[in-house]
Amino acid sequence: MPGEPLFCQRFEVAGRDFVNAGRASTTIKSILRDVGVPPALIRRAAIAAYEAEMNVVLYARKGTMELRVSPKDVQIRVQDEGDGIADIALAMQEGFSTASEEIRELGFGAGMGLPNIRKNADVFHIDSAVGKGTTLEITIRV
Amino acid sequence: MTLEAVSRILDCQVITGDERLDEEVETGCGADLMSDVLAFVKPNGLLLTGLTNVQSVRTAHIAEVRAIVYVRGKLPDREAVELAKEKGIVLLATSHLLYESCGRLYASGLAGGGEVEGERSDAGRATVLPAV
């Protein structure tokens, strides 16, 4: 999609709001389709966004998602206010999860969230401060 | 495999999408945890699950799942059905257990997602770096 203007949108995500969980990512998916991003990239971006959004809903008090689309890439920045992640390397391992029984009953907490984001991203930045929150930067190249 | 065949093999009740049973699914995936679905299901696949809340449908939409079979006699809640109608995802329900349902479909020729080539050969290779 060379020549397309930069697209930018910000979404608020509320922690523990299980009814609306995933709405921002559903909207992101629609936007990417509307601006003409190739379908295979849309699926990867939507999965990464959804996992990141669910992490905010399940583990943080609140957060924001920022979508930026340029001719060369799709960027999703997710910043939350929450407990943060003490050991990022451990959290990146498939199957590692601190999810409660309540979260598992909702169908989450498989310990695949961050690994799924990495799998679908071309570049994945993560930073976390215990007691403050976590920031993710997901880049998918067009 | 057509959704009509899936429905017949599993003795399904069609919850929504009756008019789309002629559509085909290429692979099947059985899971109750949605991140596993996002990790392993293929586009245009069939999801078999016991999770009946709205997130089952939202996950299916995100991962481009064509249809969901709810197993063990469970039925999706109202929000899930409404979202499936909106997103065009076919919902079926069977009284068979997850293991039996997957086994019946596999024996009838529906492949698992691990048996077809993934859409991305370099999956899992993104560099993990501190956020700036």
Image: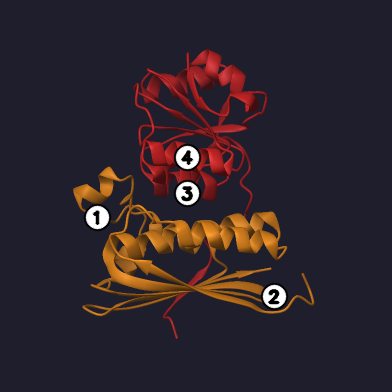
Q: Chain B is drawn in which colour?
A: red
What's the residue type where badge 4 is placed? Glu
- State the image coordinates of residue A70 (x, y, percent, origin top left): 67, 76
Asked if badges 2 and 4 are on one and the same chain, I answer: no
Chain A as rendered: colour: orange
Q: Are marks 4 and 1 in contact (CB under 8 Å)?
A: no
Q: Distance between the residues labelled 4 and 1?
A: 28 Å
Q: Name the residue under label 4.
A: B82
Residue A25 at x, y percent in the picture: 50, 60
Which residue shows up at 39% across the image and 37% down it?
B78
Taking the view exactly as shown, the residue that stands out farthest to the bottom is B132
How far apart are labels 3 and 1 at the CA level?
18 Å
Q: Give the position of the C terminus of chain B as an image quadrant.
A: bottom left
Task: Kindly indicate whether the residues beneath marks 2 and 1 are on one polypeptide chain.
Answer: yes
Give the quadrant of the N terminus of chain B.
top right
User: Label 3, on which residue?
Assistant: B39
What is the spatial separation of the Cα atoms under label 2 and label 3, in whole angstroms? 25 Å
- The answer to whether one can see residue A14 in this image is yes
User: Can you identify the residue that label 1 sits on?
Assistant: A99
Q: In the drawing, what numbered circle is on residue A72?
A: 2
Name the spot of residue B82 as percent of width and height, x first.
Answer: 47, 40
Check the image and report above or below for A59 versus B76: below
Q: State the SS at label 3.
A: helix
Q: On the image, which quarter does residue B33 sit in?
A: top left
Q: Can residue B1 be seen in this view?
A: no
Q: Which amino acid does label 2 sit on?
A: Lys
Give, as a three-letter code, the residue at label 1.
Answer: Ala
Coloration mode: by chain
What is the quadrant of residue A121 in the picture? bottom right
